[in-house]
Image (spheres, grey):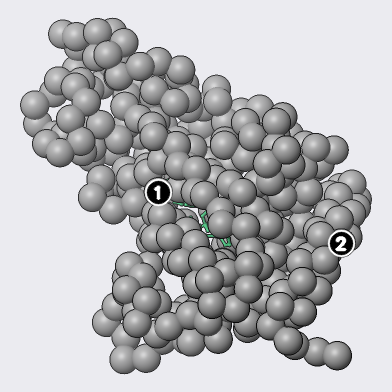
Amino acid sequence: MKRVFSGVQPTGNIHLGNYLGALKQFVELQDDHECIYCIVDMHAITVPQNPKELKEHILDVAALYLAVGVDPKKSIVFVQSDVPGHAELNWILTCNSYTGELSRMTQFKSKSQNKESAPTGLFTYPVLMAADILLYDTDVVPVGNDQKQHIELCRDIATRINNTVKKTFVIPEGRFLKAGARIMALDDPTQKMSKSAANVHSRISLLDEPNKIKKSIMKATTDSEGVVRYDVENKPGISNLMTIYSVLGNMSMEEIEAKYEGKGYGDFKKDLVEITVNALAPIKERYEEIRHSDELIEILKDGAERANAISVKTMARVKKNFGLGL
Ligand code: ATP
Ligand code: LTN
């Protein structure tokens, strides 16, 4: 069975972009893959975090994993900092990556923009991500399109070490969903939907109340043509809403276009509100059940133990191949 690894940062506001780009795939892969899903708290501290809030957000994301359908009987769910191998492998990979390649990462460029200096961790963030993936001999990494460059870097570092030191790592592949791989902000369809954007109506969070969902969708930026047609280039706003409609409502773009022929954006948006509210309701219900349960803590403890057992074996191999330790 092929092994799958992915991670989500515990930074609050898990949104439709995270769900359609990543979490939904996590659930789909469980039946015929060995899946490991991580809450990457060490990635979260690449920007300052309030410790109390971070702790809560870790449990929020863990509960959301389960609420969307990740099954701890099938998959390993754990917190990154509970398994020391991530930090250990991170250092070894850091010594085998180059400032030139890291400088080309667009996420670093955008997150450090207009700053005189940025935390070193923000710069080396993709190396820690590579460590997460390589630590488990991962074959497949389901992520949103925005992570493509980081996956390429991971493959480059692993290939370099395999070729220059010794064959040590499995070379992983990214898995990107075509429809819904990149959900854009509702208020500005040229930006990706993001947890950290100031405007709450730019995103739909998985735990939003129906009224908030309605408001965000009804306010969403479209265009003045008033025709429901998929055309990302010229009509990015409505096309983004159609992507959400298509994935949550299980309809092709052609079917959606046909359904709204001769109708305006108002009708389309009203239906999209209903589809979205109905899709998120069961997730919210399950989340409320599990978020403050002892079961959640037990699942994470058990997950860390199982993940650690795998990582210890990889680290023994890595250290041996590098000539490290006794
Ligand atoms: P931020 O928006 O603050 O930059 P993020 O949501 O990108 O944070 P993560 O929590 O690490 O950061 O993302 C979790 C997963 O969701 C990743 O696989 C990422 O690729 C995916 N993802 C994030 N935003 C989107 C989006 N707008 N569309 C599709 N997938 C996304
Ligand atoms: N960088 C990713 C989160 C992440 C990840 C990973 C995803 C950290 N480590 C390993 C897949 C595999 C993000 O920001 N979305």
Task: Name the residue carrying label 1.
Answer: 145
**Residue at 55% in and 86% down:** 95
The image shows residue 320, relative to residue 14, as above or below, that is below
**Residue at 75% in and 88% down:** 324
Q: Nearer the viewer, residue 28 or 2?
A: 2
Q: Nearer the viewer, residue 190 or 221?
A: 190
**Residue at 25% in and 45% down:** 189
State the image quarter where residue 89 is shown. Answer: bottom right
The quarter of the picture where the N terminus appears is top right
Q: Is residue 210 left or right of residue 69?
A: left
The quarter of the picture where the C terminus appears is bottom right
Q: Residues within 10 Å of mark 1 (few under 14, many from 20)?
A: some
**Residue at 89% in and 46% down:** 295
Circle 1 SS class: helix
Asked if residue 223 can be seen in this view, the reply is: yes
Task: Name the residue carrying label 2.
Answer: 309
Q: Is residue 252 left or right of residue 48?
A: left
Q: How far across and how far down the image is residue 190, in percent?
A: 23, 50
Asked if disc 1 is less than 8 Å from ligand 1, the answer is: yes
**Label 2 to label 1, Cα distance in Å?**
30 Å
Q: How far across and how far down the image is residue 16, in percent?
A: 48, 41
